[in-house]
Amino acid sequence: MKKGLIFKMFVYFLSVFFLLLMNEFPRMMAEANQNIPVGQMISRGGVKFEVNENSWEKVETPFPVFEGMKIRTEKGEAVLALAEKTRIEIGSDSLFYFDQRDQFNLLQGKVNFRIQPDVQLRFKVGNLWINKSYPLQTAKGPSVVLTKDKEFAGSILMHSKGSVTVKSVQGPLYVTSQDGTVLASLSTGESITLPSVVASSKSPTMMANANPEGTEGAAPAEEGFLGLSTSTWMGIAAAVVIVGVTVGVVVWAASRDEDHEAPVCP
């Protein structure tokens, strides 16, 4: 009978612990992904990254770049290496950050880029989105064929007065607005300059980000044991405590049942 009770307690323990752990698992994975750099950057000159609001420090080469980290080149230059041999060259007096792993936000300056066909990467400049052509092109008839471009290359220049020049060096590029309207479709060798009235965003967030010194800074990454934040470990600890209390209640209830079932000696 005691063996059966121990087995039931063990099953209850595993069930409760598994349910609590699964509730914390998505948050744990999200925080773990934030600790994976978007790419590695090699720089020269006075390249800095924002560690706190209005607080900048010089980068060391090579330097890992994470989501939300603002970087400005000042009089320096940098080359950012991403997945699958994709490269982004950042010119002097530039300011940028990755809003997401596949979204490069240029707030100031100029970039040259080479993107491999399988890499999903798009650029955001003010009110504009710059993206390579879709991998599937409509063919004559109902079938579709893949593009045979080895890579996409081009450049983006944000002028001091707000206008933006986009140039395609290799492969077609699309320039769209915030609502998805196609403003330009560039073939190899073509370029276009969009005026500030079209390119500049009027949102307060973008106006704040456009200032190199910025009034809004990326929050410093929260460090923790094994890459997990303190809040996550507190959640796990709370789950363990709840499991322990549950097991204690089960044991207490089982012991009371045994006392009631025990025969009374004459």
Image (tube, rainbow, N blue to C red):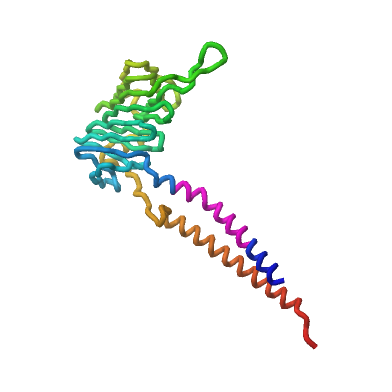
In which quadrant of the rendered view does residue 126 lie?
top left
Query: Residue 30 magenta-drawn?
Result: yes
- Image position, residue 140 (x, y; %): 52, 11
Please state which of residues 217 and 41 is positioned toward the viewer in this rendering.
Answer: 41
- Image position, residue 137 (x, y; %): 48, 18
In which quadrant of the rendered view does residue 9 lie?
bottom right
Q: Is residue 184 above or below residue 48?
A: above
> How many labels were placed on the picture?
0
State the residue lying farthest toward the top: 140
Q: Is residue 252 above or below residue 92?
A: below
Residue sitting at 33 percent across and 35 percent down? 81
Q: Is residue 163 above or below residue 23?
A: above
56 horizontally vs 149: left or right: left
Please state which of residues 50 and 54 is positioned toward the viewer in this rendering.
Answer: 50
In which quadrant is the C terminus drawn?
bottom right
Q: Is residue 239 above or below residue 251?
A: above
In which quadrant of the rendered view does residue 163 lie?
top left
Q: Which region shows up in magenta?
A: 12-31
Query: Residue 29 magenta-drawn?
Result: yes
